[in-house]
Image: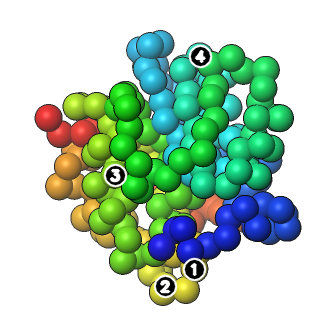
Amino acid sequence: MIQETDWDGRYRQEDTPWDKGEPAPGLVDWLKKNQLDPRTRVLVPGCGRGHDASAWAKAGFETTAMDLSDRALNDARESYESLPNLAFFPGDFLHEQPQDPYDLVFEHTLFCAIAPDSRETYASSLVRWLRPRGHFLAIHFVFPLSEQGPPYGADREEIIRRFEPNFQLLEDWSPRSFKERQSEERMFWWQKKP
């Protein structure tokens, strides 16, 4: 399970190979190409140091970012304190109940941090955090499933199987990625079923 990893320790020791110090290129491209209602409320679970969340806020959206690691959140607050529409808070996406569901959830590197036997919990949590007909945009790692991780692998078929019961797949594609992740990432754009 995701909680079994000492995420705070990983951030304190700078053992964070997933943190590239900037928003994911695929997200940056997507934000440039797509227009959303400016009132869209965005949640970024497993936000780490907040780079992807900052891209949403800079694009003008009210953005909430959560993580299990207090150290990561402190780093994020220091880096992005100038963005008034970006809030960081400690939280467990898998087990907490949202006070007010969001219009859109964006994730990158959270699903792969969750052991395969806990991924059903992830899918059901996503349903709770999104309003009816809300959207889920994700950049998933696609590589063979492994019991050793994180990261844990997944293929396109598993990802679709996990989310299709409650979401309609609008589009999926291979995004522009960081150099060392080329051909290992796939973006999915879903809408929650009514």
Are the two marked residues, 1 and 2, in contact with CB atoms closer than 8 angstroms?
A: yes
Residue at position x 78%, y 26% in the image: 81
Q: Amino acid at mark 2?
A: Ser
Q: Nearer the viewer, mark 1 or mark 2?
A: 1
* Numbered disc in front, either 2 or 3: 3
- Counting from the top left corner in percent of width and height, residue 146 is at 49, 85
The residue to which callout 1 is attached is 149
Residue that numbered label 4 is attached to: 60
Q: Position of residue 162 (x, y in %)?
A: 28, 63
Q: Earlier in the sequence, mark 4 or mark 3?
A: 4
* C-alpha span from label 4 to label 3: 26 Å
Q: Which residue is mark 2?
A: 146
Pointer 3: what residue? 125
Q: Secondary structure at mark 1?
A: loop
Closer to the camera in the image, 135 or 73: 73
Outermost residue, bottom direction? 147
Q: Residue at x 24, y 39 (%)?
A: 192
Horizontal side, residue 58 vs residue 133: left or right:
right
